[in-house]
Image (cartoon, rainbow, N blue to C red):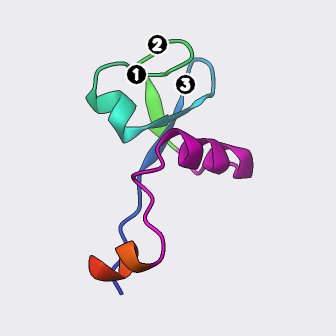
Amino acid sequence: MKMEGIRFYRCMLCGKAVNQQDISSGKGCPKCGGLRVKPANLRFFEKIGQIIKHPKVWRWGEDAKDNS
């Protein structure tokens, strides 16, 4: 089964999690607007926040099986 992950970054100015969509749209960090980011692993509550923020990105159950 092939799994593709979503890459996350951490803002170097304020430390907030930033996803690839924020960077691609030119917004940068949603908190401070900074564009300096580094790759990072998310903390537990940051993962929950990203799932709530972008629910259509995450696929569960049958939708995930159809695309593999």
Left or right of 67: which side holds 44?
right
Residue 12 disc label: 3
Query: From mark 1 to mark 2, how far is it between C-alphas?
Result: 5 Å
Residue depicted at x 34% and y 36%: 21
Q: Quadrant of residue 35?
A: top left
Callout 1: SS: loop
Residue bounds of the magenta highlight: 40-61
Of residues 24 and 9, the one nearer the viewer is 24
Rendered-image quadrant of the N terminus? bottom left
**Is-magenta flag for residue 50?**
yes
- Asked if disc 1 and disc 2 are in contact, CB closer than 8 Å, the reply is yes
**Which residue, given by chain and number where applicable, does mark 1 sit on?**
28
**Which residue, given by chain and number where applicable, does mark 2 sit on?**
33
Residue 68 visible somewhere in the drawing = no
Of residues 67 and 12, the one nearer the viewer is 67
Callout 2: SS: loop
**Is-magenta flag for residue 15?**
no
Comes first in the chain, label 1 or label 2: 1
Q: Is residue 15 above or below residue 47?
A: above
For disc 3, the neighbor class at 10 Å (few under 14, some 14 to 19, many from 20) is some
Q: Position of residue 22 (x, y in %)?
A: 38, 29
Q: Position of residue 51 (x, y in %)?
A: 55, 49
Residue 9 visible somewhere in the drawing = yes
